[in-house]
């Protein structure tokens, strides 16, 4: 069986290298003496802090990117390619996060290009999908997830599927205090597995991890991750505090 995956998305935080240094200090302190036998831990800081992270040489925490551009190289001012992320130490990259969709207008066609670039560069991908509150209320969860998965994974063969992790992040829960029930998360997981099986095969899907993301906190990690047997979590706000981040990771690792 594959290991569970805990991903901390720091987003546009912290503000300075000094603050990030203190964050790494806290991470090292809270990781000390703890063993994660069944879990991989990944932190995705802003790219400007990659070198600082790599220089710490933390063997139990891997580095991830929050986003990439789909072109390999060229005149694309302000962008960073997947290859550059990998060359600077990243092993994972998030793609299709709800904030990228909301604030930057990313659709499935763009996400598909980025996902292909991530896989081509040798990075592991964390593909985010999820429905809005209105879509859930109108019983559109399954059609929305199907559209997102089919279009995002278009042209990506079964041979690459094991390098893709799916992060189910219901948009109505992201950045809020709304917590889905275990049954709601399990329902989404079943839908996702069914769609992936149709796209690939049951055997291929067994190698793919499905995470929960959306206001994950230590007091609800059991409800949204452990009880529905998710393969880990994509953590936003709580990952900014190493103690809380590692506490969630430990809860999930021990189950």
Image: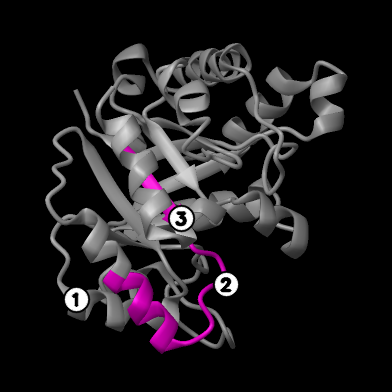
Is 204 above or below relative to 126?
above
On screen, residue 47 versus residue 148, left or right, reads left
Is 119 above or below relative to 232?
below
Query: Is residue 146 visible from the viewing direction of this image?
Result: yes
Question: Mark 2 and mark 3: span between their CA atoms?
Answer: 12 Å
Specify few, some or many for label 2: CA neighbours under 10 Å numbering under 14, 14-19, or 20 or more. Answer: few
Image coordinates for residue 155, horizontal then vertical, percent:
48, 40
**Badge 1 or badge 3: first in the primary sequence:** 1
- Image mark count: 3
Disc on res. 239: 3
Residue assigned mark 1: 56
Discs 1, 3 touching: Cβ within 8 Å: no
**Badge 2 or badge 1: first in the primary sequence:** 2
Q: Which of 108 and 91 is in front in this view?
A: 91
Q: Is mark 2 on a helix, strand or loop?
A: loop
What residue is at 19 percent from the left and 80 percent from the top?
55
Q: Is mark 1 on a helix, strand or loop?
A: helix
Looking at the rendering, the stretch of residues picked out in magenta corresponds to 5-25
Image coordinates for residue 137, horizontal then vertical, percent:
85, 21
On screen, residue 98 versus residue 25, left or right, reads right
Is 42 above or below relative to 187?
below
Residue assigned mark 2: 12
């Amino acid at each position: 069986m594959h290991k569970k995956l805990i991903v901390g998305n720091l987003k546009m935080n912290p503000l300075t290298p000094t603050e990030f240094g203190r964050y790494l200090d806290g991470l090292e302190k809270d990781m000390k003496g703890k063993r994660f036998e069944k879990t991989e831990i990944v932190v995705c800081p802003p790219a400007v802090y990659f070198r600082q992270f790599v220089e710490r040489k933390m063997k139990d925490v891997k580095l991830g990117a929050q986003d990439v551009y789909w072109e390999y190289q060229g005149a694309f001012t302000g962008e960073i390619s997947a290859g550059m992320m990998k060359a600077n130490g990243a092993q994972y990259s998030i793609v299709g996060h709800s904030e990228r969709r909301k604030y930057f207008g990313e659709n499935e066609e763009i996400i598909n290009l980025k996902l292909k670039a991530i896989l081509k560069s040798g990075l592991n991908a964390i593909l985010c999908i999820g429905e809005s509150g209105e879509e859930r209320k109108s019983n559109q969860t399954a059609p929305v997830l199907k559209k997102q998965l089919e279009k995002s994974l278009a042209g990506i063969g079964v041979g690459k599927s094991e390098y893709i992790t799916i992060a189910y992040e219901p948009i109505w829960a992201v950045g809020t205090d709304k917590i889905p029930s275990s049954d709601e998360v399990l329902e989404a997981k079943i839908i996702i597995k069914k769609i992936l099986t149709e796209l690939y095969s049951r055997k291929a899907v067994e190698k793919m991890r499905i995470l929960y993301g959306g206001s994950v906190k230590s007091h609800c990690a059991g409800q949204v991750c452990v009880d529905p047997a998710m393969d880990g979590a994509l953590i936003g706000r709580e990952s900014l505090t190493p103690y809380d981040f590692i506490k969630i990771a430990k809860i999930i690792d021990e189950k």
